Amino acid sequence: MKTLRSLRPALLLLTQLGVLACAARWGLGLDVPEPGPLLLAAAAPALLIALWALFGARRAPYRARGAARIAFLVLWCAAGVAAALAAGETGDAIGLAVWTAVAAALTEGERRPEPAAAPAR
């Protein structure tokens, strides 16, 4: 179990990078006038990063907890799978879905301690 705990950050990072890469690939694949694909390839991952920063990050100001966190994580990863499917990358979508499920299963039950509150001044 100790090994899985140490691998959890790497598994989460790889999952996040996969979701962001699929979102960028979706933007690049759209048939819109230039510079549309480049803008969408930057905007789609930026939106996902902003959502993660607000609700998913360890020190997010509105961090989802409990069932809401699980729902957020599932929907956030599903956005990457949907983006891959929309880009016509079925293999990437299946791969990301399987990777996410395996990473979640490997780290299921692992709890990270909450960040310590800043001392009052």
Image (tube, rainbow, N blue to C red):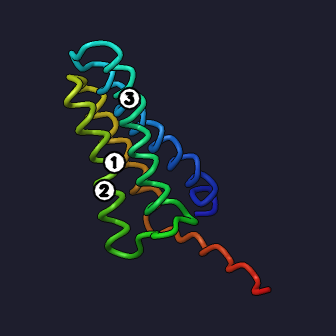
Please give the name of the residue rendered at 38% of the width and 48% of the height, measured from the top-left corner: 102
Residue sitting at the far top: 34
Please give the name of the residue rendered at 33% of the width and 71% of the height, measured from the top-left corner: 68
Gap between marks 2 and 3 measured at Cα: 19 Å
Please give the name of the residue rendered at 68% of the width and 80% of the height, measured from the top-left corner: 117
Measured from the top left, where is residue 13 in percent x and y? 53, 45
Q: Which residue is mark 3?
A: 24
Evaluate if marks 1 and 2 touch, with contact meaning CB atoms under 8 Å apart: yes
Q: Quadrant of residue 118?
A: bottom right
Name the foreground residue: 7 vs 24.
Answer: 24
Q: Is residue 22 above or below residue 65?
A: above
Q: Amino acid at mark 1?
A: Cys
Gap between marks 1 and 3 measured at Cα: 14 Å
Q: Is residue 120 above or below residue 109?
A: below
Q: Which residue is mark 2?
A: 74
Residue sitting at the far bottom: 120
Measured from the top left, where is residue 112 in percent x and y? 58, 69
Q: Amino acid at mark 3?
A: Ala
Q: Which residue is mark 1?
A: 77
For the residue carrying disc 2, how many other residues have a C-alpha within 10 Å: few (<14), some (14-19), or many (20+)? few
Describe residue 63's horizontal placement relative to residue 120 as left or right: left
Q: Secondary structure at mark 3?
A: helix
Q: Earlier in the sequence, mark 2 or mark 3?
A: 3
For the residue carrying disc 3, how many other residues have a C-alpha within 10 Å: few (<14), some (14-19), or many (20+)? many
- State which mark lies toward you, 1 or 3: 3
Q: Earlier in the sequence, mark 1 or mark 3?
A: 3
Please give the name of the residue rendered at 64% of the width and 56% of the height, measured from the top-left corner: 6
Name the foreground residue: 56 vs 6.
Answer: 56
Residue sitting at the far right: 121
Measured from the top left, where is residue 79 in percent x and y? 28, 44
Q: Quadrant of the N terminus?
A: bottom right
Q: Amino acid at mark 2?
A: Val
